[in-house]
Structures are given as C-alpha cells and as structure tokens.
C-alpha cells in the first residue's frame, strides 16, 4: 500500500519533475512506473542478479527512458563490499549499513562499484532512495545547495539514521515531511520515520509537500 502512495505521488507530479534517479532500484518496479509517468530515469542497482532482472524487466515493459547502472550510490566513488542476504535479497546492503542482527543466516559477500551522490543529485530533480540502511551516508554527503532544485523521497532504515538525518537537515535548513504524520512538516524527532513501517520521508527546500 505504501508503494502505491509513492506511485500516486509520481503520477501527481509528472509535470513538476523531469529527471528522476532511482537509487536502490532492485528489479525495477519504481523505474518502470516512473518511465510510464514520462520521466527520464537513471536506475542504480548494485546486486548483479537484481540488475540482470532489472534490465530484463525494463526491456519487457519497453522502458526507453530508463538508463540502468550496475552500481550502488554513497558519499564517494569506489569499490565497496556488498552483502547479499540469501533468502531475502531485498535486504542486501553495503557492508556496515545494518546492525549485526541483520547479518544472520546465509550470506554472500563481494565487491561492487559505488558512485558518488554529488554528480547524481546535480542531474536529478527528484531522487527515490531505498538503500537498506545506507541512506544516512548518502544524504549527509549533500549540501543545502544540492537541494535548491532537487527533492527526495526516502526510506529510513533505523532510529540511529533517522536521528542523524533529522539533525543534519534541521542544521542546513532543508525541510522534512513524513508520511508517518500525514506528510506534515517534521518539527520534532518523534515525528521521524525510523523504519519502513513508518512510511517514507520527503526532503525538499519547498515549504510543503507537492501533491
């Protein structure tokens, strides 16, 4: 249901935004919807198995406006260790992004390419970020200037990340709106989402969330 709300946001804003980056694209559901809404899309997915399915799904759905990249996104460019959670690959993540309790069961570890958020946010006017606990690293690498013409809809993975994100954006003067409080402005930490169960966080320099 929460994803349907996000999809409705894409549709409602199809004339407001033009270039969207899908960070943590998985097998391509959001990228496909974004393409059907008419956006130009860059899709980033580090897991090579998911990326293969992403490319296949884009082809099956004739998504000509989506450019896929087999890479993660973080604060800096390079090669980083990736942890694939076997049996629940939607929870796979860059090493260090999740607490140890998420590292139980069968795992595969390998290196993946990582791109810096800085040139990516310059290109985009909307970011969708679902990076399994790595959102703090991505977002805290941005500046207030980066948000002058770019918005983001973000899944926050845990309370520690939520606290640091809240503190940082309040410090630089960029607004936060939370699905948890019916997309109203976040004024206190208690209003922040601290897991996917609380819905998404919207980041913008705008005075209100555009519906």
Image (tube, grey):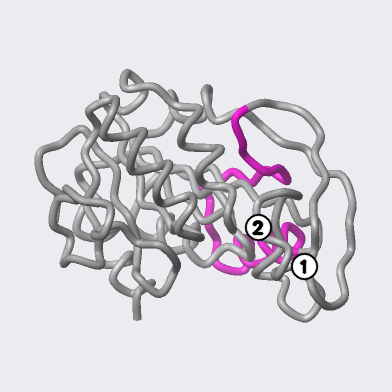
Residue lying at 29% horizontally and 25% vertically, measured from the top left: 172
Question: Considering only vertical position in the picture, is 107 above or below 173?
Answer: below
Few, some or many C-alpha atoms within 10 Å of disc 1 (few <14, some 14-19, many ≥20)? Answer: some
Q: Mark 1 falls on what kind of element?
A: helix
Determine whether label 1 and label 2 are within 8 Å by CB: yes
x then y, percent, for residue 35: 43, 55
Q: Mark 2 falls on what kind of element?
A: loop
Q: Is residue 69 magenta?
A: yes
x then y, percent, for residue 39: 37, 47
Residue lying at 72% horizontally and 49% vertically, measured from the top left: 96
Few, some or many C-alpha atoms within 10 Å of disc 2 (few <14, some 14-19, many ≥20)? Answer: some
Question: Considering only vertical position in the picture, is 77 above or below 181?
Answer: above
Residue lying at 24% horizontally and 45% vertically, measured from the top left: 176
Viewer-closest of 194 and 5:
194
The residue under label 2 is: 98
- Left or right placement of residue 4 versus residue 63 in this view: left
Q: Quadrant of residue 33?
A: bottom left
Q: How many numbered marks, from 0 up?
A: 2
- Left or right placement of residue 199 versus residue 140 in this view: left
Q: Is residue 161 magenta?
A: no
The residue under label 1 is: 103
x then y, percent, for residue 126: 35, 41
- Left or right placement of residue 2 versus residue 135 in this view: left
Q: Quadrant of residue 179?
A: bottom left
Task: Give the magenta part as a residue range.
Answer: 50-75
Quadrant of the image for the C terminus?
Answer: bottom left
Viewer-closest of 148 and 165:
165
Disc 1 from disc 2: Cα separation: 8 Å
x then y, percent, for residue 64: 53, 50
Identity of the residue furthest to the left in this view: 207
């Amino acid at each position: 249901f929460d994803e349907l709300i996000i999809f409705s946001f894409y549709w409602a804003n199809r004339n407001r935004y033009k270039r969207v980056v899908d960070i943590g694209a998985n097998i391509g559901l959001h990228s496909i919807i974004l393409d059907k809404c008419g956006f130009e899309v860059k899709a980033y997915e580090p897991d090579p198995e998911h990326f293969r399915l992403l490319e296949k799904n884009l082809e099956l759905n004739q998504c000509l406006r989506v450019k896929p990249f087999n890479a993660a996104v973080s604060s800096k460019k390079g090669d980083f260790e990736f942890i694939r959670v076997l049996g629940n690959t939607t929870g796979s993540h860059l090493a260090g992004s999740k607490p140890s309790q998420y590292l139980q069961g069968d795992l595969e570890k390998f290196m993946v390419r990582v791109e810096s958020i800085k040139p990516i946010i310059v290109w985009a006017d909307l970011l969708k970020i679902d990076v399994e606990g790595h959102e703090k690293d991505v977002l805290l690498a941005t500046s207030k200037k980066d948000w002058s013409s770019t918005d983001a809809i973000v899944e926050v993975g845990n309370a520690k990340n939520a606290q640091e994100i809240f503190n940082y954006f309040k410090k630089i003067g960029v607004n936060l709106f939370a699905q948890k409080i019916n997309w109203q402005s976040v004024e206190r930490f208690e209003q922040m989402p601290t897991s996917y169960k609380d819905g998404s966080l919207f980041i913008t320099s705008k005075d209100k969330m555009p519906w």
